[in-house]
Amino acid sequence: MICEMCGKDVPRLQTVLIEGTRLRVCSECAKFGTPVSFRSPANIGGRPDIMSRLERRERRMREKDVFEEENRVLVVDYSARIRRAREKKGWTREELGTRIGEKRSVIAKLESGEIRPDRELLRKLEKTLEITLTEEVKEAHVSGRRQNRPLTLGDLIRIEMEKQGKG
């Protein structure tokens, strides 16, 4: 087992709280923290607000299926659109964050493309910045294609060839 603090390979680890973070560490590093005897992440430091923020971040980071939301998908250049709209209004990242109830760091990560907005954040951004961040996905129908299987590259090539009259 490897100590999460110093990286040593040791036979036994202890769970301790160091600077508000629960770590599994060797006995030498354990002296820098407080022993933790419970397993529930909600009890870490007695701060449920931290857990809710981590859960929201996890939802934002999760990849979304393009067919999940009524044929609408996040545009590829969402980060640039957000930045341009914010700059057009003359707002700083902090000002935009305050208006939509998010931190400046979330706005920075959105503008760099590091995170993808969830539905709620997407709606707040679109309303506040008066922009569109989603586009409609057209369903392609290929003759002879089984209905319950996803569209493949071969299907797309066949569609293009049919459009060009080569099919």
Image (cartoon, rainbow, N blue to C red):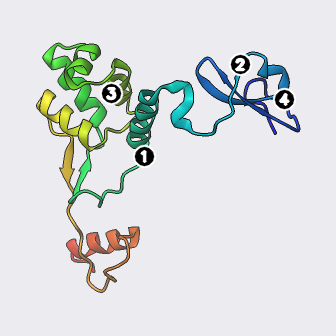
Residue drawn at the location 29% of the way across and 59% of the way down: 68
Distance (Cα) linking label 3 and label 2 = 37 Å
Name the kind of residue labelled 4 in the image: Lys
* In contact (CB < 8 Å): disc 4 and disc 3: no
**Residue 133 locus on image (x, y percent):** 21, 40
Question: Taking 26 as reference, is 68 left or right?
Answer: left
User: Of discs 4 and 3, which sits in the foreground?
Assistant: 4
Q: Secondary structure at mark 3?
A: helix
The residue pinned by badge 1 equals 62
Residue drawn at the location 61% of the way across and 17% of the way down: 19
* In contact (CB < 8 Å): disc 1 and disc 3: no
Q: Secondary structure at mark 1?
A: loop
Name the kind of residue labelled 1 in the image: Arg
Residue drawn at the location 35% of the way across and 56% of the way down: 65
Which quadrant: the N terminus?
top right
User: Counting residues from the N terminus, which is met first, the one under dot 4 or under dot 3?
Assistant: 4
Q: Quadrant of residue 97?
A: top left
Which residue occupies the extreme right position in the image? 11
**Residue 138 locus on image (x, y percent):** 20, 62
Distance (Cα) linking label 4 and label 3 = 38 Å
Which quadrant: the C terminus?
bottom left
User: Of discs 2 and 4, which sits in the foreground?
Assistant: 2
Residue drawn at the location 20% of the way across and 18% of the way down: 87
The residue pinned by badge 2 equals 33
Q: Residues within 10 Å of mark 3 (few under 14, many from 20)?
A: many
Q: Residues within 10 Å of mark 2 (few under 14, many from 20)?
A: some
Question: Taking 30 as reference, is 115 left or right?
Answer: left
The residue pinned by badge 3 equals 111
Q: Is residue 78 above or below residue 161?
A: above
Residue 8's tag is 4
